[in-house]
Image: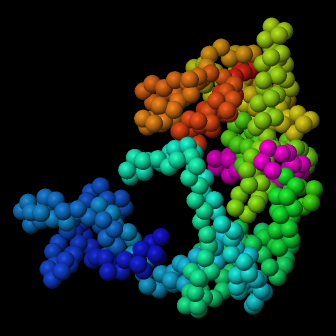
Amino acid sequence: MRSLMTSALSHRIVELEPGIPVTYRVTTGAETESGIVSEFCAGVWSKQGKAVLGAAVRKGGILSRDLVPTPVASLLITVVEQGRVTDKAKLLTPQRYPVGSRVSVQQKNGKCLITDIVELPPPITVEYRTRVTFEMLTHDFLTSDYSPRVYFEESFIDRDFKDLVSEAEAIWIDQRRCHEARILEWRQVAGALQAIVAPSDELSLLAKLGKEKKVGDVVEVKIEKVTRDPDGGGGWVVSRTRDGLEVPIEMGDMSISELGYGLERIEGQWVFLSITSFDVMGRPKLSNLDRITQDLRKIRETIIRTGEKYRVEGHIETIESLGVEGKSVVVSCPTDSGVVHCFRAKVPNGCDTNIMVGDNISVALSLSEKGGAALYHNLLDFEVASLPRSLSYSEGKISFPFCLEQRELEHWEAPDEVVQAVYRDSWQFCLEGEIISG
C-alpha cells in the first residue's frame, strides 16, 4: 500500500522538518505555507525526511508563537524510496490476471510463469441478507431480491494492459503440474507477488462435485492434516475427497470451539461433512457443526431423562487458571463418527497438581443452569429491531438461551460474526463438566 500511495500520490509528498511539533511545507496554488503534524497522527515522524500527505485539516495552530489557521496533517504515509517502489506493472498484476481465471502456465528459467488468460472467471453473484448489515451512507437498505452479478469483461484487459503486464510468477498448490491452471489467490511470498494456482485436473474435480452435490448434501473426506498458528492456536484443516480434491476447512467448522481443540486426534480418519456453500471457484465449504449439535442435544436429553450426570472419556488439551477459584481444563472427546467434542471442566481442589496436558481423564457432564451472556458490540438500531424473541439486549450485552437453532437467528440483521458467536456459545457452554478421575 505504501508503494501504491507513493506512486499514485507523488504530488502530495511533503518535506518534514523535525521539531516540536514536527512541521512540513505544503504548496497550494502559487503559495507555500507551513503545516503541523498532529500529535494524534499515527507513526513517529520526527526522524522522517518526507512523507505522503494523506489527509489534513485547517484549524488554529501555533507557528512562530502565533495562533493562525494552519494545515494540520492527520494522516501521513511513509514514502517508499524510488529504488524500492514496486513498479506499476506489479501493482496491477492481480487485475491483469484475476482470481478464478484459467491461465496458461510455462516453466521459464526455473520459474513457473503465467503467460496468458485462457478463460476469465465466471460471473459473481452478490448475495445480501434481507437488509445489508454495513450502514450505507444514506441509511438505506437493499431489498432481499436485489442480487446483482459482477462480470469480468475481456475488453478491460486491452492490448496496452497486456503489454504493461505480460507475465506473472506462480506457485503450484501441490505436487501436480499442468499446462493450464486456475488462479486461487495472490500472495506476497518473500517480498514478491505470486499467484497460487491449481492444476486443470482439479477443475474437472470441482465441476464433477458441483454436478453431483448441492448445498445441504454430505461429502466424505479424509482429514489429512491440522495446521495451527503457533501463537494463537487457530488455523485450518486440510481434507481430501475420495477423488483426490483438496478441501481446506476452517477450524470453527469442525469444532464448536473456534480453536478446534483436539482435532489432531482424527487426522487420517474418513468423515462425512455437510456442504454449507460453494465459493466462486466451485470449491465446497464443509462443516461438521450439525453433527456436533445433534450429539450435544442427545447428551442433554439423556441427562434430563435419567436425572444423572453423563460420563465421557477424553484428553486434556489445555489447563487454564481461574484465579482464586482454582483451575479448569478443556477436554477433547473424539468419537467414532469423526466428531471432536470439547468440554470445560472444573478441577477439584487438591487435584490440580496431578494433572497434565495430554492426560486421559473422565468427566461428568451436567446441564448448565442459566443462559449465556456475552459482551459483543453495541448493536445498531435495526439490529436491535430484528433481534430474535429468544434473545435480549441491554447495555452492549446480548443474553441468550442455550441450544439455539440456526433458523432462530436467520432473520437477525446483525453481522455474521456476531450471529455465529451467539450460536456457538449457546452450544459451547450448554453443559458443565467436572473431573471425576485422572
In which quarter of the view is residue 38 placed?
Answer: bottom left
Report the front residue among 422 and 42.
Answer: 422
Question: What residue span does the magenta drawing correspond to?
Answer: 214-239
Q: In the rendered structure, does residue 170 fall within the stretch colored magenta?
A: no
Residue under the point 73% across and 43% down: 253
Report the front residue among 346 and 393.
Answer: 393
Is 137 left or right of 280, judged from the image as shown?
left
Measured from the top left, where is residue 82 in percent x and y?
Answer: 43, 85
- Up the image or down, 161 lies above or below 198; here it is below
- Up the image or down, 95 lies above or below 324; here it is below
- Up the image or down, 295 lies above or below 201; here it is above
Examine the residues drawn in magenta and state their main secondary structure: strand
Q: Is residue 149 visible?
A: yes
| Placement of the C terminus among the 4 image quadrants | top right
Measured from the top left, where is residue 207 in percent x and y?
Answer: 83, 64
- Up the image or down, 6 lies above or below 399; here it is below
Is 437 left or right of 394, judged from the image as shown?
right
Residue under the point 64% across and 47% down: 232
Residue under the point 14% across and 80% down: 31
- Specify the farthest residue to the left: 66
Q: In the rendered structure, does residue 217 fall within the stretch colored magenta?
A: yes
Measured from the top left, where is residue 39 in percent x and y?
Answer: 27, 57
In which quarter of the view is residue 335 placed?
Answer: top right
Residue under the point 48% across and 26% down: 393
